[in-house]
Image (cartoon, rainbow, N blue to C red):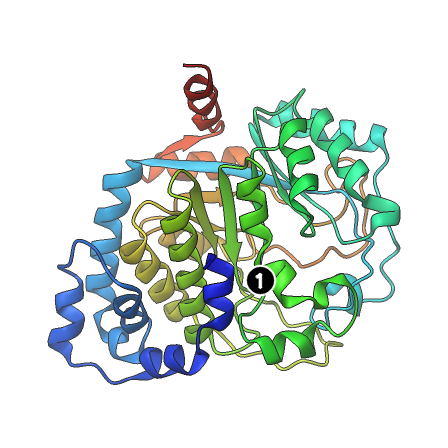
Amino acid sequence: MTPSKILADFDPEIAHVLTHKKYESEHILSLLEKERLTYEDFFALVSPSAESFLPQLAARAQSLTLSHFGRTKQLYTPLYLSNVCINQCVYCGFQVKLQIPPITLNEKEIVDNYRYLSAQGFGHILLLTGESPRFAGVDYIERAIILAKHFFPYVSLEVFPVSTSDYERYAAAGANGITLYQETYNKVLYSTLHPKGPKSDYFFRLEGPERALLAGFRQVGLGTLLGLTDWRLDGALLGLHAYLLQRTYWQASIQVSFPRIQPISAAPHDIFPVSDKALAQLICAFRLFLPQAGLTLSTRESTDLRNKLIHLGISHISAGSNTRPGGYTRGSIEPGQFETQDNRSLSDVMNMLIDQGFDPILKDWSTLFDSALKTS
């Protein structure tokens, strides 16, 4: 069975029991010494029983991050190409804040933003859109990738899921990686949160990373929107998803992001708060479970918290982010999809990293190694 089918058939009650079970202290401590964890071990590390061992978890996570990533921190920045979307996600700022005007960048605006971000020093750009085949469909995204490769050695996508053949088009155009959040692994809740539009198809979205890997991508990013439901359960199934993909597509690089939802006053969905401590526990548990996975923290989080969490399991961070379409050069004042909390410039983030003993990396050279392997 494929990873997506295994995950779709996985009994969520098992994950709920194992992530809320009371474990003996000796058991939690023993997991800190294991060289390789099972997914059941990972579930234990996100349980309430592991909360009191956060200092030990943090120390182990920091050690593993140094072992696998050294002092390097990969930097990237997002560019929103379009906010037009035909889905009706009840928690999304693009959908709830109806006063936001529809914006889709034209080719000149795209290039202007590329030129600006490249001049800042960025070598890795993340392109984002809503889901609107009419305004920003596959042809539009493919063209944006081709243009981006003139400015950036590494281009990744956070766009709507497509067929394997369309992912092949993106890869051929020069895209290096894709990120696709499942939002929540609770299938019943997923249907409630995504009542209309293509995104309402839970399994098509779940299978998206595999279609991208089959199409030739070698980096896929996963994530849930923490706070839509119980973070322990969604975090556990996110970890299982990443584990199954890594086990099946062993040549690929798996990355995991940890966005926390920001409350929207008009949204008809309750938020389940995820504390800073809970976020730290989840990140540390992921690092112990998947020591080679890239772990990403965006500018959704505060300056102070990001400064602290980069010492634990985080390997990739964004900088200088703007969530408004073309916001780097358009001077737009309309709201973005969410408000960033860490508004430091690229140079400020780099200086912070250097001051704390890290090596900020602006270009992902793995693409060069991939090319060398293909031609050898």
What residue sits 51% from the left and 45% below the top? 220
Q: Say whether residue 374 is left or right of residue 57.
A: right
Residue 222 at what x, y percent from top left? Answer: 51, 54
Residue 333 at what x, y percent from top left? Answer: 81, 50
What residue sits 67% from the left and 20% below the top? 150
Residue 158 at what x, y percent from top left? Answer: 63, 47
281 is higher (above) or lower (below) than 349? below
**Residue situated in front as seen by the camera: 221 or 151:** 221
Q: Amino acid at mark 1?
A: Gln
Q: Which quadrant would residue 122 be assigned to in this image? A: top right
State whether residue 88 appears in this view.
Answer: yes
The residue where tag 1 is placed is: 182
49 is higher (above) or lower (below) than 332? below
What residue sits 68% from the left and 40% below the top? 165
Q: Which quadrant would residue 153 be assigned to in this image? A: top right
Quarter occupied by the N terminus: bottom left
Q: Residue furthest top?
A: 376
**Residue situated in front as seen by the camera: 317 or 188:** 188
**Residue situated in front as seen by the camera: 205 or 333:** 205
**Residue situated in front as seen by the camera: 166 or 128:** 166
Residue 64 at what x, y percent from top left? Answer: 24, 47
Q: Say whether residue 231 is left or right of residue 43.
A: right
Q: Secondary structure at mark 1?
A: loop
What residue sits 72% from the left and 76% below the top? 265
